[in-house]
Image (tube, helix red, strand yellow):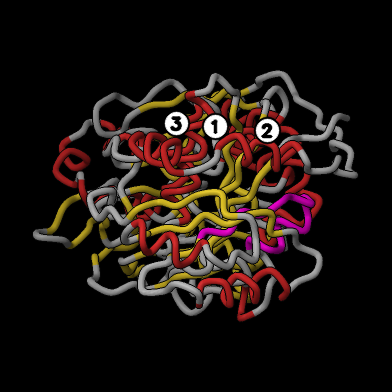
Amino acid sequence: MNPVPRLIIAGTHSGCGKTTVATGVMAALVARGLQVQPFKVGPDFIDPSHHTGICGRTSRNLDPFMMGEDGVRDTFLRASAGAEISVIEGVMGLYDGIDGTERSSTAHVATILDAPVILVVDAGGMSRSAHALIHGFSTYNSRLRIAGVIFNRIGSERHRQMIGSSPTVPSLGWIPKNDQLLIKSRHLGLEMAHETGIRAEFGTIVNEHCDIGALSDIAHSAPQIKADLRKRTVESPRVKIGIAWDEAFRFYYQDNLDRLRSAGAELVFFSPLHERLPDVQGLYFGGGYPELHLSGLESSSCRTEIRDRADTGMPIYGECGGLMYLTEEIAADRTYRLCGVLPATTGMTKKVQALGYVQGEGIAGSSYLPPFLPILGHEFHYSTVSPHSDARYAFQLSRGRGISDGNDGLVINNTIGTYTHAYFSDEFAGSFVGAAEKDSST
């Protein structure tokens, strides 16, 4: 296997301009006619949507906690096939991982992939001190290679000269301060790619102020990854699984969709907001922003069609926004009727209710999933779900909050609704597809 040219764009901390630089580098490389494969470190759905729009190739998440180190290599190598260069956007600060460790940090992924790191430094309010910061990041972990630095928020040519007078690591870019290039935030994060086109401007900024040729040379200096692709059997489609995909539901790990296909599912994308329920044998509702589209979801005929199919035993799986949609109602500016499948109600909150990684296992006999099936993922929501007193759950969590006190995966018939955005294992995907196949034959 030939070496995969690759770069990791990392930051000293959140908010330093890492996203601006990473998406800008992707756009600048695409503008030069290159096939660019994008990636994002960590559990994130927003940034990958922008990467995909810029590069025309589906961005993938790389997360050692959810995927394991072998899984990170496997996803990276599979997704990079056919690309001329791979660009990985980091998460938080370079060394920020789980519980104050380096685990699942950008540095961890850089080590797994033996990838050169480009460090983004917010130089606002600093000159020579920036080099002390860079020196610390460069020497903190001897296994990493910080191959260059891009300085963000340069205030003037004089500011640039003061920093450039004593370099410690090659300077590959000087991006001037520009508060216009901001993406609007909402309670769950930044706007999705289909809601804003502002990141397209990042390519022009980066191309003008960064050395794209030097970045490409560094990417090509990355050594061969010493790993083989896992053998993956792809079964012929046996069932159709509907995937909710519109303005309200948009959060999916691409690996989850790929595993469903490998397990024998034909994926049928549909809009609960605008369309009737398609002819399928299973349904998957990912996360998203259903709270922004409550009137449309309430008035759509799809809502009652889903409840009817759930009552007949169709396997349905909903995550976070999907969980909310499957409950009876949601309290926002007023009370809106939802699908009424799960015996619970939902309420929106002004403060985050849960944020972080999730780990647990399936509860024996509770659902179509195998007993004690390991569950890995993350949770992030500004809502609460209040189940009825006789509620049953699919998962018991050892890490994470879930719906209530470490219980997650509210179950009724063959419907599961969970706050966890799960990263599917082959066994998980196979069980879901198998349940759909069983239901279609009865």
Looking at the image, do the residues carrying marks 2 and 1 touch, with CB atoms under 8 Å apart?
A: yes
Indicate left or right for 310 with 367 as reference. left
Residue at image position (38%, 64%) is 159
**248 and 406: which is toward the camera:** 248
Name the residue tied to disc 3. Answer: 54
Q: Quadrant of the C terminus?
A: top right
Q: Helix, strand or loop at disc 1? A: loop
Question: Was residue 117 drawn as part of the magenta stretch in this picture?
Answer: yes
Which tag is nearer the camera, tag 3 or tag 1?
A: 3
Residue type marked 1: Thr
Indicate left or right for 180 with 172 as reference. left
Residue at image position (76%, 35%) is 4
Q: Helix, strand or loop at disc 2? A: helix
Q: Which residues are magenta?
A: 106-120
Residue at image position (57%, 75%) is 133
Residue 313 shows in the view = no
Q: Residues within 10 Å of mark 3 (few under 14, many from 20)?
A: many
Residue 224 vertical placement versus 176 (above, below): above
Q: Quadrant of the N terminus?
A: top right
Name the residue tied to disc 2. Answer: 79
Residue 396 shows in the view = yes
Marker disc for residue 58: 1
